[in-house]
Amino acid sequence: MPPPKSSLDELALRGKRICVVQDDHVSEGILRVHLLRMLSRAGVALVGVAANGPDAIEMVVAENPDLVLIDADLRGALRRR
């Protein structure tokens, strides 16, 4: 019988290069800390964190990640605050 899977499939993500885009509001900052901790435990290579759309675009172009996790409620869309 295979071992139970965690809430994050570690084998699927291990070694992947990931960027996270999330703005810096306090409650969301707490969520970001937990997300980054989960990704670290899964063996993900976190290659960048951005807080707004323009910085995210620059980061993705520069880092060419396998996956980008974006806050669905990113304030300001692609504008800088």
Image: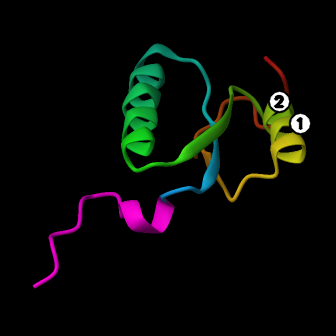
User: Quick one: SS at disc 1?
Assistant: helix
Is-magenta flag for residue 80? no
* Local SS, label 2: helix
**Label 1 Cα neighbours within 10 Å, binned few <14 / some 14-19 / many ≥20:** few
- Stretch of the chain drawn in magenta: 1-13
- The residue under label 1 is which amino acid type? Glu
Q: Is residue 9 magenta?
A: yes
Image: 49 above or below 66: above
Q: Quadrant of residue 37?
A: top left
Q: Main secondary structure of the magenta part?
A: loop
Residue nearer the viewer, 35 or 25: 35
Q: CA separation, marks 1 and 2?
A: 5 Å
- Does residue 36 appear left or right of residue 72 in this picture? left
Residue on which disc 2 sits: 55
**Which residue, as the protein is rendered here, is positioned at the far bottom?**
1
Question: Do the residues bearing badges 1 and 2 touch, measured as CB atoms within 8 Å?
Answer: yes
The N terminus, quarter of image: bottom left
Type of amino acid at the residue the image marks with label 2: Asp
Asked whether 66 or 72 is in front, the reply is 66
Horizontal side of 8 relative to 46 (left or right) equals left
Quadrant for the C terminus in the image: top right
Q: Position of residue 55 (x, y in %)?
A: 82, 30
Q: Is residue 59 left or right of residue 21?
A: right
Q: How many marks?
A: 2
Q: Is residue 71 visible?
A: no
- Which residue is disc 1 drawn over? 58
Whether residue 72 can be seen here: yes
Kindly identify the residue that appears in the image at 46 percent across and 30 percent down: 32
What x and y, as percent, mark residue 71?
A: 58, 41
